[in-house]
Image: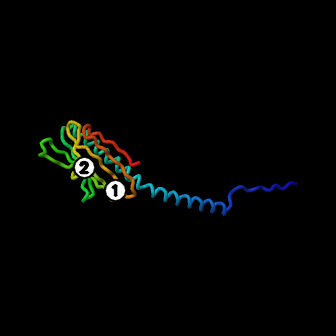
């Protein structure tokens, strides 16, 4: 008579605890890595949103034969999009959005006192460069061409 001993397969409690500890440590490190990169994600998302607003303003200015104006209000930490009739008599706000506290926007153009960009019915604009900078140092530049009104996004190398 033969007695067969069945060998049980599986993991011991110690092995399971060690694997759980390793997973916990890895999760913590990934969380730290993601939180460091979230600033870059925030400034990139904001820059894409702003460039879409500028392109929208140019397109609407041409199609509606009106002047669209983006104004940066640093005091209220907002940017606004206005539409004006070509005779400058009728002005209304189209868009009013906050600028996140961790982001600074600066308009650099031909007139340093100016904090706005206008898009005209012919497709041209006042032009300029909007610098979008996150508090961690990541910088994007939105270049608005004076002649074509085209918006290009560049990052600091």
Instruction: Give the residue at x 27% y 42%.
Output: 56
Q: Is residue 94 visible?
A: no
**Distance between the Cα atoms at labels 2 and 1?**
19 Å
Say whether disc 2 or disc 1 marks the residue closer to the N-terminus: 2
Q: Residues within 10 Å of mark 2 (few under 14, many from 20)?
A: few
Image coordinates of residue 113 in percent, x first then y, are: 21, 53
The answer to whether any part of residue 123 appears in the image is yes
Read off the residue under disc 2.
95
Q: Residue at x 49, y 59 (%)?
A: 32
Image quadrant containing the N terminus: bottom right
Helix, strand or loop at mark 1: strand
Q: Is residue 144 left or right of residue 43?
A: left
Q: Position of residue 49 (x, y in %)?
A: 33, 47
Image position of 90 with respect to 18: above or below:
above
Dot 2: element: strand
Query: For residue 129, which numbered disc appears in the image?
Result: none
Where does label 1 land, which residue? 103
* 13 left or right, relative to 29: right
| Point 22% across, 43% down: residue | 126
x and y percentages locating residue 42 in the rendered image: 38, 53
């Amino acid at each position: 008579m033969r007695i067969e001993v069945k060998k049980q397969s599986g993991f011991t409690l110690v092995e399971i605890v060690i694997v759980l500890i390793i997973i916990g440590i890895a999760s913590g490190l990934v969380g730290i890595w993601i939180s460091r990169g979230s600033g870059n994600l925030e400034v990139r998302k904001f820059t894409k949103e702003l460039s879409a607003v500028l392109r929208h303003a140019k397109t609407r200015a041409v199609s509606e034969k009106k002047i669209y104006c983006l104004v940066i209000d640093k005091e209220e930490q907002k940017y606004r999009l206005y539409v004006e009739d070509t005779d400058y008599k009728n002005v209304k706000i189209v868009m009013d959005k906050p600028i996140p506290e961790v982001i600074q926007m600066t308009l650099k153009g031909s007139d340093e006192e100016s904090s706005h960009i206008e898009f005209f019915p012919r497709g041209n604009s006042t032009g300029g460069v909007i610098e979008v900078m996150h508090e961690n140092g990541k910088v994007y530049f939105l270049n608005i061409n004076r002649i074509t009104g085209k918006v290009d996004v560049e990052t600091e190398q």
